[in-house]
Image (cartoon, coloured by chain):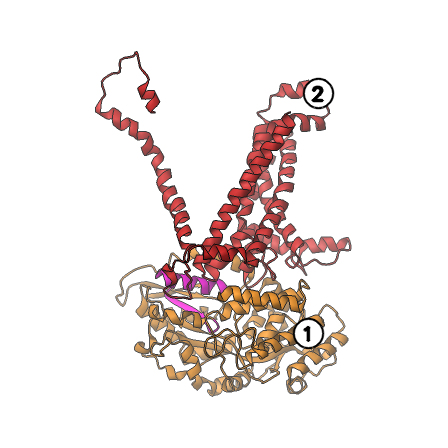
Chain colours: A red, B orange
Amino acid sequence: MTALLERPSAVKRPPRAPGVKAGKRAPYGFIAPFFVVFGIFGLFPLVYTAYVSLTGWRADQPGSEHSLVGFDNYAKLLHDQFFWNALKNTVGIGILATVPQLLLALGVAHLLNYRVRGRTFFRMGVLLPNITSVAAVTIIFTQLFGRDFGLINWVLGLFGVHHIEWQAGTASSWIAIATIVTWRWTGYNALIYLASMQAIPFELYESAALDGASKWRQFWSVTVPLLRPTILFTIVVSTIGNLQLFGEPLLFSNSQSPTNGGSQHQFQTLAVYTYDQFWQKFKYGYGAAISWALFLVIVIMVGLALTLSRRLRGVSDE
Amino acid sequence: MSTALWRRSAAVAGAALLLAPIAACGDSSASGSSGSEKITLTVNLFGDFGYKDLYAKYSQEHPNITVKENVTDYGTHHKNLQAHLIANAGAADIEAIEIGQVAGFTGMAAKLVDFNSQGVDKNQWSEWRWRFGSSADGKQLFGVSTDMGGLGLCYRSDMFAKAGLPTKREDVSKLINSWDDYFTAGTQFLAKYPDKSVKWFDSASNVYNAILAQAPQASYDESGKVIVDSNPDLKKAWDLTVNAVQAGQSAAIPAFTPAWNTGFAKGQFATVTCPSWMMAEIKTNAPDTKGKWDMATIPGTHGGNWGGSFLTVPKSGKHTKEAVELAKWLTAPDQEEWLFKNKGNFPSDIALWDRPDIANYTDPFFTDAPVGQIFSDSAKNLKPQPYGPHSGDIGNAIGNALVSVEQKKATPDQAWTKALADVKNVTS
């Protein structure tokens, strides 16, 4: 702004009308609502949570509200087996839910890109799972994954597989939860891929075909490289989403204390553990510390995802 | 005792957990309190207290009052109430508190209406009982007592017959006198019952709760210290239960979940430890099994209490006066008697235990078992246990550990170690 103002101008400025100054402020007025709302619902909770995480506040100890304990909560976190377990679960479920999902979405988008009859119907159709509520979807999936009378075990039983208790095993519970996430989000990512696929000029495919490239080859050598920025975007967004995974593991837990995330914390994610400590055990200080740790984990993971994808791109461009 | 009255499915529970904070916001409607003004009273419960018909009756007698009931699951209900009381906002006009949770609310007694000043005589209940609903100094009575959970042993007499076990309740009570007898009978049942998918009991935590309910102490001692790792009775209840689980006696269905509800209807187990309120569970979940169930005395000390509740009136409510009247009415003798006969919730009022209509009541669903007498006797023989603020969460931790043994996810030793770590996580 200052640079602009200092630039010598040959054009004589018209005298300022009283309204002009206000006009310069107007843009700030227009963007203000976002920053005000963000300040109240985004920034303030963030800062306040940081403050609470430095206190020893817990509901069962009256007067502990303002007892500052420094970084004790964070130190305790380092030795908390349930925290590390939750981190492991979050990353594990996250990978299981992201990788197959994005590959699947890419394939679905590719198919939707063909000129088929009823294209719009299919394109809207893949988005349907995404607009249903987490609670409804998870409750239905939990029924499907039922031990004694669930549909999935019944089908597996036809192939001679013994009834699996999906909530019991670490791997089985991760797979079940990742399935729910994948079901909900594949269509959404497919549509994002589809949008950028349609921006790829047709000539590229034409010339590739002339060079004798098969459909498969065209997909890998034309479509995928040109989709890279979009793929990067979906990886980052899915990573953030999966690190905050909450509703699915909570509702999948077929127990009296759902925030425990399974009988041995098999699928207790970080978000669920935060909720458990904050709103179930009422350890406000400690719960706040976990929230902040989760925030840092997300920052690190997204940083990793970005660096990794950039490096991959750099290598293949050479 | 601690994993008490879970009467809701976990799935629905979880959904409620997500929605509860929103749902709880739209509480009482109109303000002001003149006698004829239309008033909606909200009642937050953690299960089916059987009150629905009673509300209708109350509204007939008090045309200006409508009652709206909100049910969330046991865990969520108490957690929400705690949060709402801390915030002085969001609580309903009447809030139920379960006996295993009530110690966590003693410190917040000042935020609840004192029933002593509302014409309630606390001596209608036993001293141990009203003490649970009172402030630490005993001066303020913040909860009026509803039901209690004396214990019986519910069993499927048709299944017993097929397994060559006695079917008459007197014979069953004689055969199953101690907990060892109970598990021995279980071995016999499993060996002889033709359908091998049918197990002896529903869920390890329900058996563990009943055994521990008979001990002088559970997870707290009288001074309020957590004694999970040092209480021999608790470890004994644990050992007995996990041994039976390893012998394959448990249907391993987590209690109070949809699968458990289905278990009753499909007949997946032959016995259930039966606090009085469990009768309502069985009737609701498996109405077709009427006449197949019977009730014997509970093994062990033949006593014990598991569950029971209080009604409280948060001071933050807009219609505390009307709410107090409703709470008093719901816990009055005539309503209590109706609840026992129709729903199975046994009253905690001492005077009612000898009321002929209650003491002589037999339940046709349970093959005319003398349930009135069974629960009156058990109420009179009751030796109360101390509870602490985290009794509920500690019960959860041990319940989860038992589930992990049932799932074969952990050995009993691993599960026990994890349970102790969970208990430590709750208290520190």
Q: Residue at x 61, y 61 (%)?
A: A264
Q: Secondary structure at mark 1?
A: helix
Asked if residue B403 is positioned above or below residue B176 in the image, the reply reads above
* Residue assigned mark 1: B243
Asked if residue B226 is positioned above or below residue B371 in the image, the reply reads above
* Residue assigned mark 2: A209
Q: Residues within 10 Å of mark 1 (few under 14, many from 20)?
A: few
Span highlighted in magenta in the image: B75-100
Q: Is residue A39 left or right of residue A249?
A: left
Q: Is residue B133 left or right of residue B393?
A: left
Q: Is residue B17 magenta?
A: no
Amino acid residing under circle 2: Ala
Foreground disc of the pair 2, 1? 1
Counting from the top left corner in percent of width and height, residue A304 is at 57, 39
Q: Is residue B91 magenta?
A: yes
Q: Residues within 10 Å of mark 2 (few under 14, many from 20)?
A: some
Q: Residue at x 41, y 51 (%)?
A: A49
| Observer-nearest of A231 and A153 | A231
